[in-house]
Image (cartoon, rainbow, N blue to C red):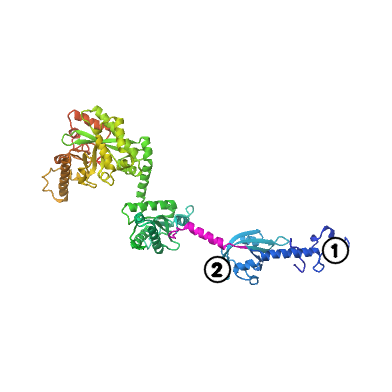
């Protein structure tokens, strides 16, 4: 009621207003049309109003959703029982209560709610916490609607409140599961990247002016490393964890991961600044979002290693584990989350490659080298298809007669960007990726084809070609069939093909290499052990292996650089002379052993005439190196063969041509002995 008059439930205007009369209720129509209804005359309109009011009140009072009528001063006029139940109070207690005593004012939209109260909008929806009398939190979905007066101005607000506490709890559980590792309860990779993204967004890269250089930090003693906020990551992986899973079982491995996670969380979690996360498997990461420099991160990595060195007692087992840690620290303005983690992961594997149980700080130069390696590894197979590889040959010269007996085939990569690459730049990558199989097959066939040309031009010399064979070629392909096919396609006799395999690959585990080499030897192919003396050096195998040649590693030849002949160096002081004597005795003993077993010996890395002569005196059969010739085109070997045919040996030809000890002099270690 307003001023004692009844109000219309539809427009809130007094029922005595002329606008609520029907056309037949206009003045002057006579006594048959009664006047405006009053509370006393029992008019049907009043009855209808009372029925409507009762219906609305029943809907308000019995609704299952909380409802509250609020005045312009934010005080409660009336609430229904459902609302009172949500707050743990009675309906009467809530009358005239300020709404902020019920709803937490924090988080209320600063512009939208005032706009609704002042009539600028009609409805607002928001999720808010209700203050329950018992102190617990009740999450609610609140819809606030504006009730206007007859003139359209704001009169009241009506709040509809729905309890969504269970939905929120379910959502929180799902969010927790999405952001945490179920085994260790640590934040997972997704959570880690969310925090890292947030840290990187703190830098305004577009508008912030360059700050002045940071002063030395008291904790590190170093000047600020870069501009603006900094971030760092210690990315760690447990060493040898797979062995624990394999020997003790995955259930023990899981318990160990839980123990490691607990130790990391307790020791290295700092609220707001350091986050410990499990990145997957046995990899963990510690994120530092307010780094003060690389010294802080390397100190953190050292403390992580120290913490993990203490034994873990897991299910009756005392386990000792170590970890490898990759450390990356830089300015937020200089990186992205993806690049930071990529570099941290790469640095982690550098740490493992360097020996494990250590931390390694990211090195941009090493990173660039690693990127180059990856680019080369990716381009290997397409390069073979594009014909970017070529073969150079280095002569194998008889020390007794000075004649060329054969040539070693050395593959080169004519890279369009990096120029000519020697085998040490790409052969390890080819072996890792498996590209060595098609590349090795191509080298084998091309080398056999070239040896056949030499045989055609110089049939009296029967110059053989020596081709390096990788262990993976034996394991990943039918090397016997490949060799047979190459010999058939090129017409080269098997006796003019020599295959070189390293000692470690030949004498490694498993019998397949020996079976393959025996089959090749039965075909008539010569087998040479390359780099002999650097691998297993199991002399007992030599009498049982299908081997024809021992190629001595170049490290044994270093002692032969002294030009003094055997027996004339007793007066030379120092360790150099002693090493030279020892090397000569070792080489002499290996040559005698090889000859006793019916093998020939080839020396690599010959750089001078003195070395060649002293090796000849030990009984060494053939040699190769820059003294005789650098690796070159096939025509280089053909030219030397022509000289041999004309009565000049390879050494005499070179010495007479440039008057020095060898064509190339002493320009450094020869690259051909170690595959170029």
Within 10 Å of disc 1 (Cα), the crowding (few <14, some 14-19, many 20+) is few
Is residue 616 in view? yes
- As drawn, the label of residue 34 is 1
Percent coordinates x, y for residue 178 in the rendering: 48, 56
Distance between the Cα atoms at labels 1 and 2?
A: 59 Å
Q: Is residue 561 left or right of residue 248?
A: left
Percent coordinates x, y for residue 236 in the rendering: 37, 56
Give, as a single range, the part of the protein colored magenta: 161-186
Within 10 Å of disc 2 (Cα), the crowding (few <14, some 14-19, many 20+) is few
Quarter of the rendering occupied by the C terminus: top left
Which residue of the protein is positioned furthest toward the right in this rendering? 30
- In this rendering, which labeled residue sits more in front, label 1 or label 2? 2
Quarter of the rendering occupied by the N terminus: bottom right
Q: Return the residue at label 2.
A: 136
Q: Secondary structure at mark 2?
A: loop
Q: Residue at x 36, y 35 (%)?
A: 387
């Amino acid at each position: 009621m307003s001023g004692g008059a009844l109000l219309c439930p539809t427009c809130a205007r007094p029922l005595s207003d002329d606008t609520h009369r029907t056309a037949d209720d206009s003045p002057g129509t006579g006594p048959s049309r009664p006047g405006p209804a009053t509370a006393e005359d029992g008019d049907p309109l009043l009855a209808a109003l009372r029925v409507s009011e009762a219906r609305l009140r029943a809907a308000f009072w019995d609704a299952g959703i909380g409802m509250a009528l609020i005045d312009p001063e934010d005080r409660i006029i009336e609430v229904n029982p459902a609302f009172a139940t949500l707050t743990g109070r009675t309906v009467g207690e809530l009358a005239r209560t300020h709404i902020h005593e019920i709803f937490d004012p924090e988080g209320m939209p600063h512009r939208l709610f005032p706009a609704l109260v002042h009539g600028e909008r009609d409805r607002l929806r928001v999720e808010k916490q209700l203050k329950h009398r018992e102190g617990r939190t009740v999450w609610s979905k609140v819809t606030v609607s504006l009730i206007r007066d007859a003139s359209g101005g704001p009169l009241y607000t009506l709040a509809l409140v729905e309890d969504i506490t269970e939905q929120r709890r379910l959502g929180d559980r799902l969010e927790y599961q999405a952001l945490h590792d179920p085994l260790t309860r640590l934040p997972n990779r997704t959570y880690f990247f969310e925090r890292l993204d947030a840290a990187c967004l703190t830098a305004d890269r577009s508008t912030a002016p360059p700050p002045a250089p940071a002063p030395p930090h008291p904790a590190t003693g170093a000047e600020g490393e870069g501009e603006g906020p900094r971030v760092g990551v210690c990315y760690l992986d447990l060493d040898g964890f797979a062995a624990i899973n394999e020997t003790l079982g995955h259930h023990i491995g899981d318990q160990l991961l839980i123990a490691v996670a607990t130790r990391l969380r307790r020791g290295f979690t700092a609220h707001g600044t350091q986050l410990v996360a499990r990145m997957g498997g046995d990899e963990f990461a510690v994120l530092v979002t307010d780094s003060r420099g690389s010294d802080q991160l390397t100190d953190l990595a050292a403390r992580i290693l120290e913490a993990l060195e203490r034994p873990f007692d897991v299910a009756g087992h005392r386990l000792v584990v170590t970890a490898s840690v990759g450390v990356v620290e830089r300015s937020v303005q200089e990186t992205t989350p993806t690049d930071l983690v990529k570099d941290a992961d790469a640095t982690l594997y550098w740490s493992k490659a360097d020996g494990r149980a250590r931390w390694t700080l990211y090195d941009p130069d090493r990173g660039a080298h690693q990127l180059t390696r990856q680019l080369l590894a990716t381009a290997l197979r397409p390069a073979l298809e594009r014909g970017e590889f070529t073969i150079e040959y280095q002569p194998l010269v008889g020390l007794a007669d000075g004649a060329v007996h054969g040539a070693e085939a050395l593959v080169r990569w004519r890279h369009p960007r990096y120029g000519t690459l020697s085998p040490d730049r790409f052969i390890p990558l080819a072996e890792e990726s498996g590209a060595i199989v098609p590349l090795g097959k191509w080298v084998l066939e091309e080398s056999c084809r070239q040896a056949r040309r030499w045989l055609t031009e110089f049939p009296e010399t029967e110059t053989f070609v020596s081709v390096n064979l990788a262990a993976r070629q034996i394991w990943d392909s039918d090397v016997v069939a490949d060799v047979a096919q190459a010999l058939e396609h090129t017409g080269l006799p098997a006796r003019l093909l020599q295959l070189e395999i390293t000692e470690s690959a030949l004498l490694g585990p498993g019998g397949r290499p020996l079976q393959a080499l025996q089959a090749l030897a039965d075909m008539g192919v010569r087998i040479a052990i390359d780099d002999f003396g650097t691998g297993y050096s199991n002399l007992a195998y030599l009498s049982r292996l299908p081997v024809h040649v021992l190629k001595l590693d170049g490290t044994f030849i270093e002692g032969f650089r002294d030009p003094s002949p055997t027996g004339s160096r007793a007066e030379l002081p120092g360790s150099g002379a002693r090493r030279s004597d020892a090397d000569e005795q070792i080489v002499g003993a290996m040559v005698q052993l090889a000859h006793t077993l019916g093998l020939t010996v080839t020396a690599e890395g010959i750089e001078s005439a003195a070395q060649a002569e002293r090796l000849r005196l030990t009984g060494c059969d053939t040699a190769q190196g820059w003294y005789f010739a650098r690796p070159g085109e096939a025509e280089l070997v053909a030219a030397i063969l022509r000289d041999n045919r004309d009565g000049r040996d390879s050494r005499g030809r070179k010495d007479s041509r440039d008057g020095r000890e060898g064509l190339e002099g002493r320009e450094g270690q020869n690259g051909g002995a170690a595959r170029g």
